[in-house]
Amino acid sequence: MKLNESKLYCVNTIADLNHLKSLYIKKISNTLDLSFEPTVTIRMYNYKFEQNSDLKSLRLKINPYLVFFENQITSENIVLNKGLCVMYPSTLVTGKIESHVKFVGNSGTLLYEWSKRDKTSSYSVDEIMAMFTAIDGRIDTEATVQKVKRIIELLITDLFLIIE
């Protein structure tokens, strides 16, 4: 669920951020599946620490509760990073700004473009790699492939990509 389909919110001031947070909490609080995050956390834990599945064998979805925004706040008192950011329920409901995540480059573009597609679809790692390649054709060396796979692992750990 997003507040407004296919929209990247622009946050220029702290008031903008607070307004976005209040909208998000109002919209999500009535629709949030309380079992969602514990379930995907267990799957992530099993993948990351129990190592009971290989990255290539996973089918991944984007977290349906993500909201993207472009942060332009430059205040040094705010921990928010400049750039493309994303919010999701556990960070917003607590109101902890420090939990927001900054995405730069391909990973942010990929997630944002992916969020505008059918959220019920899942993808293999090879299909995700193909999305990266479509955005940036320089993904052809072994080092770059390994870097992208590491980004995918981090997105799983942070619950931005979820294991089906």
Image (spheres, grey):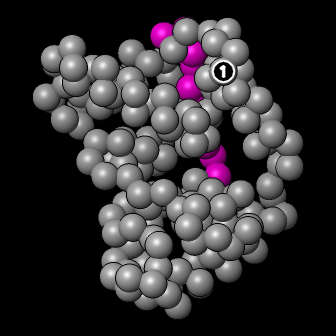
Q: Is residue 77 left or right of residue 142?
A: right
| Residue at x 58% of width, y 61% of height | 99
| Residue at x 44% of width, y 66% of height | 69
Q: Is residue 72 left or right of residue 100?
A: left
In the image, is residue 135 above or below residue 129? Answer: below
Q: Identify the image quadrant of residue 37.
A: top right
The stretch of residues the image draws in magenta is: 56-65
In the image, is residue 137 above or below residue 96? Answer: above
Q: Identify the image quadrant of residue 18.
A: bottom right
Could you tell me residue 66's position as x and y percent?
A: 58, 54
Considering depth in this image, is 141 or 69 the residue closer to the camera?
141
Amino acid type of the residue tagged 1 in the rendering: Phe
- Mark 1, secondary structure of its residue: helix
Q: Is residue 57 magenta?
A: yes
The residue labelled by disc 1 is 49
Could you tell me residue 147's position as x and y percent?
A: 30, 27
